[in-house]
Image (cartoon, rainbow, N blue to C red):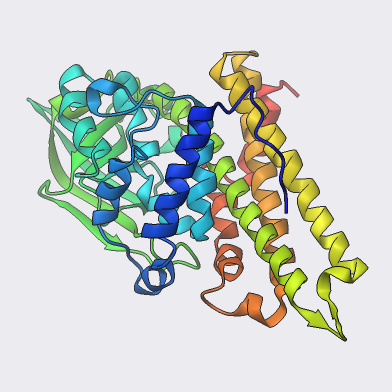
Amino acid sequence: MLNTPPNPQHYSPEHEQFRKTVREFVAREITPFINAWDEAEEFPHALYRQAAEIGLLGIGYPDEYGGTPADGFYSIIVSEELARAGSGGLMASLLSHSISVPPILHVGSTELKARVLPAVLAGEKIAALAITEPSGGSDVAGLKTTALRDGEHYVVNGEKTFITSGIRADYFTVAVRTNPADKSASGVSLLLIERDTPGFTRTPLKKMGWWCSDTAHLHFDHCRVPVANLIGEENQGFRAIMLNFNSERLGLAAQAYGLAKVCFEDALAWARERKTFGAPLVERQVIRHKLVDMAMKLEATRATLEDLTYRVEHNLGAPNLLVAQTSMLKNFATQTMQFCADQAVQILGGMGYIRESRVERIYREVKVLMIGGGAEEIMKDLAAKQMKL
């Protein structure tokens, strides 16, 4: 098993105590039930409040809103420990606020922050991010959903799709075009739209993986949204979206690493226990080589993830290069997850193909992480542009 000791430069005793708390929470409140939740394609709303009670939802947010100021290494710990349940879908929905709330925190009005953040961080309300449209995802500047000013309201028309927590969320951070005449990024804004807004409907989507995470298609039909729900300045939403993407991609890399590590651990445990022709699988050179290849990729991913997190935390490096490195890390980590999931299923053989196996579920969930938050091809192109290649 990988037993790389925590780097004291990155992880303090406080970090490790928090890790212990989250690990116990996962073992007690999630792991015993995750298979049933996945089959039911949902998990209890109460889990949000339970997660909030141990400080999991508020990590990295200010005290005044019920959060706990913390560095990026706490977020890595959250991803690693939640991954032990072997469900990316649960991670995606339980932490959907981590991609929807930051724009409110960073550019939202004082009133909007006070109204939304405490309830979300306490697990009382659920937040979702709505950027992707049927016509495209990564091309944010080309979005078509409109929000036209009419007195003290915006009238919103359009669609969003593949939205995590799209059915159960109470608050939606929605990218809209507030200047229809401007087809560029400069005509984009962010609005907070609430679930009970007249004209706002949601349709659930069926998926290959992430079964217990509800994913939805959203439709806005002349929805009247108060101007007070504007997040930041009108026509200035694109920059907030891009900054949000950077932190989201770093988070996705951490999730991919955590899930890949689970695959390695399950494959190693099976190889030590399973016997073929009188000897444990791990004594077969071909199996040992598979495990070493997995460990090699995991170590490289971990080192890169921690190094980049440190540099982001301390503003070390040109902003464009940090964007490029985040894009490359997102690809590298998800490729590591893909490799480890594939090898784990192969090592477990028939058991790796049986539902309720962690590696079977993770194998089905690989592709969503390679697409969501920016597909591999988009990440490569973005990195190239930021590096001025």
The residue shown at (49%, 59%) is: 85
Residue 262 found in image quarter = bottom right
Residue positioned most to the bottom: 277
Q: Where is residue 363 in the image (x, y as percent from the top left)?
A: 61, 65
Residue 285 place in picture, x, y as percent? 92, 67
Q: Residue at 65%, 34% (x, y): give it.
A: 6
In the image, 225: left or right of 362? Answer: left
Tell me which residue sits at (62%, 31%) in the image: 326
Query: Where's residue 220, x and y in %?
Result: 22, 48
Q: Where is residue 124 in the image (x, y as percent from the top left)?
A: 19, 44
Where on the picture, by quarter, is residue 365? bottom right
Q: Does residue 134 appear in this view? A: no
- Does residue 111 show up? yes
Quarter of the image for the N terminus: give it.
Answer: bottom right
Asked where in the image residue 267 lies, by quadrant, the reply is bottom right
Question: Which one is nearer the viewer's eye here, 202 or 75?
Answer: 75
Residue extending farthest left: 151
Q: Quadrant of the C terminus?
A: top right
Instruction: State left or right for residue 324 relative to residue 178.
Output: right
In the depicted structure, whether residue 378 falls above or below residue 293:
above
- Residue drawn 53% across the image and 29% down it: 13
Compared to residue 349, the image places residue 78 above or below, namely: above
In the shown orientation, is residue 228 left or right of residue 215? left
133 on left or right of 342: left
Is 379 or 73 nearer to us in this picture? 73
**Closer-to-camera residue (169/72):** 72
**Considering only vertical position in the picture, is 368 above or below 240?**
below
Q: Is residue 280 above or below residue 343?
A: below
**Count of numbered badges drawn on the protein:** 0
